[in-house]
Amino acid sequence: MKRNRRPDPTPPDESFEPYEEPRTIPIPVLSIAVALALWGGLTLYQNGQAVGVGQQERADDLAAQPALGTDSGAVLFEARCATCHQPNGVGVRNAVPPLMGSEFVAAAPQVMTQILLHGIDGPISVAGRQFNGHMPSFSSVLPDQEIAAIVNYARNRFGAPHSSQLAIDSDFVAEQRSKYPNRGSWFGGEEIAAVLDTTLPSQPPARSGSIESANPAVLKLINDGRGPAWACSSCHGSEGQGGETVPRLAGLPSGYIAKQLKDYVAGDRHNETMTLVASTLTEDEMTGLGNYYSRLRSPSNAAPSLGGDLERGEQLALEGDWSLDVPGCFSCHGPSGFGVAPGFPSLAAQHPAYTAAQLAAWAGGQRDNAPVALMNHIAIALDDDDRRAVADYLATLPPVPATGGPAGDDEDE
Amino acid sequence: MNRLLPLSIVALGILAFATLMLVVVPGMQIRSQSPSPGLLPYTQAELRGREQYVSLGCLYCHSQQPRASDQAPDDQRGWGRASVASDYVYDQPHQLGTMRTGPDLLNVGARLPSQAWHLTHLLQPRAIFDWSIMPAYPFLFEQKPAAEPGDVVVALPPGYAAQNGVFVASQQALDLVTYLQGLDRTYPALPDAVRDDGYAEPDDEGRKP
């Protein structure tokens, strides 16, 4: 505080009220205020745009759910049938029956509908040639409308002129679906001819033998657990179907399952929960569990959930992307991702959260238990969007069809 | 202070504007939300378990709000899709949480569906994860010389098992696990669902709103 040494010559005006003249706001302050206001306005605008993008993303995710039934028969045929039966429907000699000229396609529509719903596991004679049928069941991955669309398309294209051109609708499929609710695959052409259409030409006999019942000790492990090991089914489901990051086990090659269990114990694959469980198992029990789950068939409960681009996923699965040095999934994991025993696990109907998490683990080095580092290279080459795309696509596939004979595990080990 | 009235009016006006933007408008947005299709109300057992969840303070370490992939890699962690307002219709009070000392739990029932696993993990998290920093909750369990009919015995690895007898889950532990098993919001979110989309941006392919 400064003090005036000299008193003021005039006494201050007691009624004076101090005031300030209005002054213009300095240019720098004004410009900062204007800039802040602009920034606020821009943020509001961008936020409005982002809400639209977010809603679009959710709409896309919703559209990625199967069960919409809007695709045409031709599109569905290309996506679902052509990988094995070939785009022109002639099949693969000695491996996949033709649709062109097939008596089953030309027969009454319930025959094809039932085959699509339940799949085939057994010998079948088509157009004079015998095949070992391994057809997956589409009942859990295709809604009634889409099955109707495929049946109508295939019968029109391959069944004419013998087939009645009567088109079927989703009600027909729903009725057929309720006819044999709990059965698995058809045991080859003989059973189909006997049950569905007696006018079909003579069929080879179905494989004899009943399905070997699983070892009771192994069943007890699966359903009740033992000591510190929780029951397998408490996480992986009563039908080995899994969920989210818990993988589907049904249909995985027996040798693959046993190897993973050994790797958990040896520390080559990392998951604390599975290490604890696997460390209580003997080698025989590991093999027994592998055999049980490799023969188990259950409907798919997986659906795209990561918002991935399904077309990109299909491209990666079928052809790969050689600009990234990534081969197609199916080139090792088998057509339609049904797995190649004993080393290559099936990918079809696997849960997208699990597939994407495993790809991330391969890329990050947390998973490294393959004899060659192929999966690491692939996972590193794929970016985040690609991983989600391929995981979502694989979830739309039908689950692994019955492989192996009724009593045997002939393709495993 | 010769312009008290204008000053107070301006101050109250700013307060009213802030209340409108931060309380009234969001309130109106949330109020109109109906439950997502696929979301079921909690059962009685789940509600009892939820009370345990609240009273044990799980919220202080576990969030219940998976983020969008624009914000955090929660989908790669397997925690599920980003949650929306309709997912919380039955949550009173909500347990969103902000701390992520432990994993997000909004979809824990989908990725960890095993009752037996949860009981082991609540009694002693170190029995499964030797690096876990989650507290153990032994007071939710009872040590008995032998299990009686109807008791749920906790599976424990050697070294953690009871010296003599067994650990049996209390009703509180069973309720809490029922609640955790029921936490599953993996159904798809509706396109018009409300959430913070501030980080969603058009991607390279020019996906526009």
Image: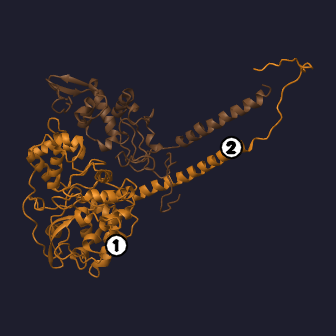
Chain colours: A orange, B brown
Residue at x-position 35% and y-position 57%: A387
Q: Nearer the viewer, residue A163 or A383?
A: A383
Where is A179 relative to B5, above or below? below
- The subunit letter for the residue under badge 2 reads A
| Chain letter of disc 1 in the image | A
Residue, far bottom = A161
**B63 vs A260: above or below:** above
User: In which quadrant of the rendered view does residue B58 lie?
Assistant: top left
Q: In the visual, does B143 lie left or right of A68?
A: left
Q: Nearer the viewer, residue B109 or B138?
A: B138
User: Where residue B205 sits: x, y (%)?
Assistant: 47, 63
Q: Can you give x and y, in whole percent of width and height, for residue B139 in the image?
A: 28, 23
- Residue A254, placed above or below residue A105: above
Q: Which residue is mark 2?
A: A33
> Which residue corresponds to mark 1?
A167
Disc 2 to disc 1, C-alpha distance: 70 Å
Viewer-side residue, A76 vs A92: A92
The kind of residue tagged 1 is Ala
Task: Decide: is A55 above or below B29.
Answer: below
Residue A366 tag number: none
Residue A63 horizontal side relative to residue A294, left or right: right
Q: Type of residue at label 2?
A: Ala
Q: Position of residue A2 (x, y in %)?
A: 77, 20
Q: Residue at x 18, y 50 (%)?
A: A260
Q: Is residue B44 left or right of residue A193?
A: right
In this rendered view, identify the residue nearer to me: B163 or B46.
Answer: B163
